[in-house]
Amino acid sequence: MGKEVVNKQVLFKDYIEGVPKESDMELKSSTIALEVKEGTQDVLLKNLYLSCDPYMRGRMRNFHNSYIPPFAPGSVLQGFVVAKVILSDHPDFKEGDLVSGMSGWEEYSIIPKGKNLTKITRTDLPLSYFVGILGMPGITAYAGFFEVCSPKKGEHVFVSAASGAVGQLVGQFAKLMGCYVVGSAGSKEKVDLLKNKQGFDNAFNYKEEHDLNATLQRHFPEGIDIYFDNVGGSMLDAALVNMKVHGRIAVCGVISQNSFQNAQAIHNINMVIPKRIRLEGFLQSDYAHLYPQFLENVINYIKERKITYIEDVAEGLENAPAAFVGLFHGKNLGKQVVHISDE
Ligand code: NAP
């Protein structure tokens, strides 16, 4: 039997309604044997970075009819990670490999049959990027903008939650295409970063605006060609009124909506008819085939300093619940990750 070590874990307590709280999660210490059984193809990981993602809230609800099942109450939270292989019975992975994939919110995880792990071969980039700009949020922004929005040079683009993991990339991709880009975000600091560091043409703090319809009219007097929607609710309603004829709305997320039951009505949905708006929801997982092309292009953009990526790194597994909950209060400045161990 392999050496037993302490394994700190974050457990999901029970199903929630509304916005998650730190008390919905619990820190626990258990032990784990550092071994993989022969013939299992299992892989033992030491987790290095955890990703905090808004979709995880959906897995905390007692809702079984989604594209991904809910967490089981009492189980270890699951999410995207960057990790190091400690032991492997899988032919594709060996001790010392760096990988990304779905793992537990814990120090060590056994991944049965190495399921959905991807080897990280580029070690000249920050490892945390593989759960951010080069991971799930990155492909979301890439596929959502280039595939779903069908952008053209010179078009006018609006992005909400623009300073977040996905939004900051959408805005920068749009600038690379020669579009005019405005972002909304929830603080002055975020707005300043968008304008001064990430090349947005303009940005505004939606929390200081009392009439979002008038705000969008001010920023887009000729109308919006593309709205990349990360928030839903009243921002979507205001955008619908301000879209141009044949505008496109990519519905990426609805973080402003706290529950299915109390979802805000979208009053201006009828605008899709006279304006012939294409409003399309999408899931990044449908675009996995684009991953190699995405990776190559985005790594080039990073190397050529054509895009910057802002991360918010929390330190230590014990701070992971607060970092996750912070997403729903706009506390993150850029992509929220948690550093739990060095290589
Ligand atoms: P993020 O933007 O890094 O973090 C979430 C941000 O949402 C917060 O920082 C906050 O920014 C904003 N927010 C929180 N509560 C809000 C509210 N009530 N109203 C308006 N804004 C609010 O997160 P992300 O990972 O980039 O995800 C952005 C969106 O994309 C989420 O809706 C997520 O579910 C969605 N998503 C979809 C896919 C897909 O495949 N469709 C994949 C990944 C992500 P402010 O300070 O600006 O308010």
Image (cartoon, helix red, strand yellow):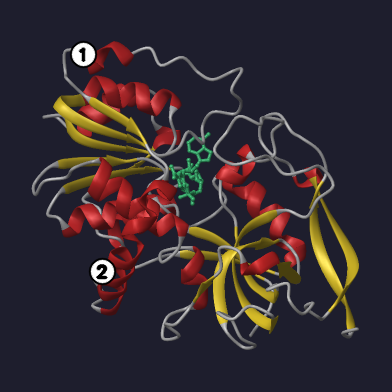
Say which quarter of the image contains residue 338.
bottom right
Please indicate whether residue 5 sits to the left or right of residue 25 in the image.
right
Q: Amino acid at mark 1?
A: Ile
What whole-number distance in Å separates the C-alpha atoms at marks 1 and 2? 36 Å
Say which quarter of the image contains residue 294.
bottom left
Instruction: Assign the N terminus to one quadrant of the image.
Output: bottom right
Q: Residues within 10 Å of mark 2 (few under 14, many from 20)?
A: few
Give the residue number, with chain letter if any, for mark 2: 297
* Local secondary structure at mark 1: loop
Q: Position of residue 237 (x, y in %)?
A: 35, 21
Give the residue number, with chain letter if any, for mark 1: 273
Residue at left offset 81%, top offset 62%: 9
Residue at left offset 77%, top offset 43%: 72
Q: Position of residue 300 (x, y in %)?
A: 26, 75
Q: Reply above or below: 138 against 122.
A: above
Mark count: 2
Q: Reply above or below: 242 against 14.
A: above
Q: Position of residue 159 (x, y in %)?
A: 32, 42
